[in-house]
Image: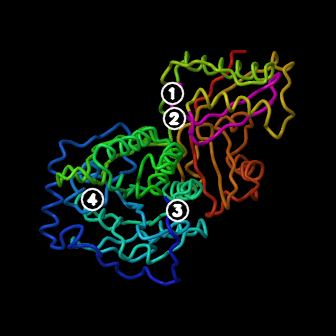
Amino acid sequence: MAGFLFAFSGISYGQEIREAQVAGGFYPADPAELEYMIDGFLAKVPHSIRPEGMLAALIAPHAGYVYSGQVAAFAYQQVKGLEIDTVIVLGPFHRGFFEGASVWPAGSWKTPLGEVPVDSELASAILKESDKFKFIPQAHLGEHSIEVQIPFLQRVLKNFKIVPIAVSDDSLDNCRLLARVIFNAIQGKKVLIVVSTDMSHYHPDEKAQTMDHLVLDRLVQKDAEALWADLSSRRGELCGSAGVLTLLEIAKLMGATGLQILQYANSGDVTGDKKSVVGYGASVLYKKTTGENTDMLNPEQQKELLKIARQTIETYLTAGKMPDIPVSDPGLKEKRAVFVTLREHGELRGCIGNTVATEPLYLAVQDMAIQSALHDPRFMPLRKEEIKDLSIEISVLGLPQKVKSSDEIVMGKHGVIVSRGGRSGLFLPKVAEETGWSKEEFLSELCSQKAGLPADAWKDSSTSISVFTAQDFGEEK
């Protein structure tokens, strides 16, 4: 967690080559020896795990290769030969604390295996989103956590760029901000995220394994809040906690479908000294491949969700509490983004939802049903006398996907999200059908009515446009 405050001076740097800082220490300085070592590690990984969906991120250790290189190889074997344009590497700064994050903006990083260019365009896109994100040279010079990942990348990928990001501020607010910025910046790009971290430090083997497996469980659960609580209470340890928490927040935004632990070991497994060990883990995060809503709900699941929404509204308005509804269907327990629309005598009575999957679908339906009934600012709160005249519709959203221009929007198929300068607005796909608007009218109303932007903001290149699909279903009339 946060240590002492490290004072940085303003230094203009980043166009130059960053020379290898720890070659000959953490890994061999001789190129042939380095290649031989990495390839040997990779050859010992029994197979690649190719889950359904697209690989989005790796978590890998950053100790000296003789200690953690074999564990790291389990992560890097998963991306061998993939087409990746840019790798964002999140690593800690071990010698102190600074707020925000330090993004290396340009130039290249050099290892014994050659130079890797920095993706200056993507780095600039991240830097400009918040004054908390800066370039702090001292957070990178002499620091090994990012550097030791690059030779592995050089052996498994070709023609890629990097965005090195040093981060030591593991407050949830900072990690969520960084996650949102990274998520928005990588839409439409072939980007891999690598998080560099070791686990528990200098405990006896038995205690280390207990602490580390608690953390690994939190990773599988993709639960940033629970992990942060465990780290804060010292029940678990991660020296790269900020990067890991940021990744878990990105996982929420991208609707990641799984995080799998590939390998775990500690330094005692190498040295034989179990009295004081450092833990190492390798993990892979993957997501769906498109913005399409491919996980369609069957009629029985649809009927169950509509029943849950109605029962929730009825119970809340009559008894003042949320009902505890048991759900056994695994498909209704997956984290999904959802909107709940209420109509009274065919007229809109409330519509609220979320675009980020943060909780199981059936709980999200309950929450959005109450929000739509009581907290849509366009309407007075629903009264229990109105329930009998109410009809309920549910829209389960696919993952948003950024588009380059409005030409890619298909009216009636795509819902649209516009955002600029902290303002955003959303229309569901069915809005186009219900209104009969042209695409220009649809986008103009979205900008002005929902996002509070000028009506023609969608024509401005600084306005982000994302599309998504939705599965809509409602109560039978």
Whether residue 42 is visible here, answered yes or no, is no
Q: Are marks 4 and 3 in contact (CB under 8 Å)?
A: no
The secondary element bearing badge 2 is classed as loop
Q: Counting other residues with Cα less than 10 Å from the Cα at mark 3, is it few (<14), some (14-19), or many (20 or more)?
A: many
Q: Nearer the viewer, mark 2 or mark 4?
A: 4
Relative height, residue 3 to residue 189 (above, below): below
Left or right position of 312 against 209: right
Residue at the disc numbered 4: 157
Q: Earlier in the sequence, mark 4 or mark 3?
A: 4
What's the magenta region?
332-359
Q: Earlier in the sequence, mark 2 or mark 4?
A: 4
Q: Position of residue 407 (x, y in %)?
A: 57, 52
Q: Position of residue 77 (x, y in %)?
A: 24, 50
Q: Position of residue 306 (x, y in %)?
A: 65, 20
- Using the numbered discs, state the Cα–Cα distance from disc 2 to disc 4 in whole angstroms: 30 Å
Please say whether residue 457 is one of the residues in the magenta stretch. no
Relative height, residue 319 to residue 447 (above, below): above
Q: Earlier in the sequence, mark 2 or mark 3?
A: 3
Q: Earlier in the sequence, mark 1 or mark 4?
A: 4
Q: Amino acid at mark 2?
A: Asn
Q: Quadrant of residue 315?
A: top right
Residue at the disc numbered 2: 293
Q: Residue at x 13, y 55 (%)?
A: 40
Please say whether residue 353 is one of the residues in the magenta stretch. yes
Q: Considering depth in this image, is 462 or 384 the residue closer to the camera?
A: 384
Q: Amino acid at mark 3?
A: Asp
Left or right position of 319 against 217: right
